[in-house]
Image (cartoon, helix red, strand yellow):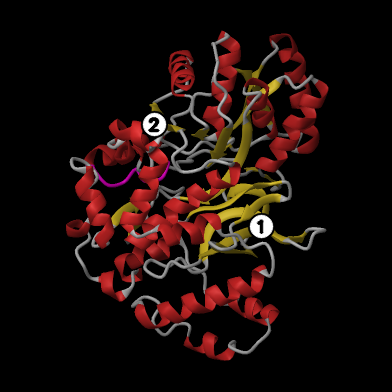
Amino acid sequence: MSKMLFRWIFRIAGVRRLYQEVVESDRLTQIKPQIRADLSRLLHTVNEKNKFFRGKFTTFLSENAGVDDATFFANYKQLPSLTKQDYAEAGQTVMTDAWATVDPKSMELQVEGKPLDSILRLTKGNYLMPMATGGSSSLPLVVHMTKHHMFSMLFTFFKCWYRMGWRPGEKMMIFYPKNTYNIDDMVKFNKFSWLTGFRYHLFDKIDEQVVRGLVNDLNKFKPKLLLVFPSPMNMIAHTIRRFDLPLKHHPELINVSGETFFDCQRRNIESVFTRSKVEDSYGSVELGEIAHETKEGLEVFANVAYVETEHNDAGQPEMIITRLHLGDFPFIRYKMKDIADVDFKQRSDGTERFVITKIEGKDSNFIMSDNGERFYPSFFNAFVNELNDQFKQSILEIKVYERAQRELEIQFIVNDPSVQVAIAAETNRLLWEYMSPKMQYTVKFVDFIDHDYRRKYRVIERIGDVEFAGGIVGDAKKTETVREIETQTAP
């Protein structure tokens, strides 16, 4: 019944074709020429119909109409890039002219109360759906999404799940922290989960009681897909093993995203959820999901986004993303502030993969040694792998805190207490060798990482880090959450 319901909603809302274009379509050959065509169409549209961008691409479009692809992309790379600050200051002027001056409050789609009325309004498209990010700067970027924008973003998530083998109507469970993203609005439809196949299981913290409740829910609901962040998923697996919880149902698919995914986390999850396929995805609140795990790396959805890199002031490759086909609130050369390598890879069968590798997270996500060298998450991933090779894969999780300018605290979760002393000694020895013998390292072993999941979880946590989990800006309750976290983290 739920599969039919999805087909009915897509048909009534008029987004079936969009679903096919975003979810079912792929680009595996001649990727760059197709992206070039999309970029040209997008620039032509906003150059004429968008107050913020109007006239800014006239010269580029005229001078690059007849050049080869390599020249086009080289010249595209010279166009200005825009930050979250730029978009936040521009506000609604970034929207296409038809929506740039309307009162967004009067046009908001309300999901609470009468779902049928909301579905009928979806067919007309006369609404704006607000979405807000958090961000490491604590500066919210509020995006007012049109019908096309909203469904296009939504379908990028569907595309990840579709790649894994899930189809609309099959059961899915979403395990997310409360009061983050727009999860609270989504849960308002939870009473209809028996129709849609979705079930939300929300949490404040990760402990035995919470995980026991989740396991009971998994055993009863039997979802095909479990959607969760990597660190909570790792703690779920750790708790199930530690307390010998009766896990009877292994979801066929587990999709993790939103955080750095360490090898030790994957190994631990797969050792407990032995019948589940675990895959990673990458995206952002602003753009939706843009890449999903393959053997070559995280494959960019080339029919959805174009990803470039340029070196920032620290010499690190910073991703710049253009979200294709979004003319109503366009993200053109948007600086994500995420560090990664991006490349095209050719397979032996002639197909291509547009992949992101070695994602480090935000450009602030590093530890600086006393000699000025930067150590990003990939260093600590390799560091844990080296320790695990020595200590029989005992380390399940690592968290690195910058406690003072030259002082680090390293927290481990291990599955064998007998190796703690040896791991601590080897940790100090290796960090003295790799980072600096002049810095101070304190090693602790814990049962749970103490983390407020309303904030983004980072393996590296520096002094002053505050990155809210996106979408927590909007109503009074969420604004109070922001104030509470800011008070707790104030120096």
466 inside magenta stretch? no
Q: Is residue 242 left or right of residue 428?
A: left
Q: Which residue is mark 1?
A: 316
Please determine whether, in this image, residue 77 is positioned above or below residue 231: below
Q: Quadrant of the N terminus?
A: top left
User: Where, by quadrant of the figure, is residue 66 drawn?
Assistant: bottom right
Residue closest to the eye, 345 or 58: 345
Q: Which residue is mark 2?
A: 200
Residue visible at 54% across and 20% down in the picture? 249
- Nearer mark to the viewer, of 2 and 1: 2
Q: Is residue 206 left or right of residue 338?
A: left
Q: Earlier in the sequence, mark 2 or mark 1?
A: 2
Residue 246: horizontal and vertical position, in percent?
A: 54, 11
User: Where, by quadrant of the figure, is residue 239 drawn?
Assistant: top right
Magenta residue span: 469-475
Which residue type does callout 1 highlight? Answer: Gln
Residue 456: horizontal and vertical position, in percent?
A: 48, 39
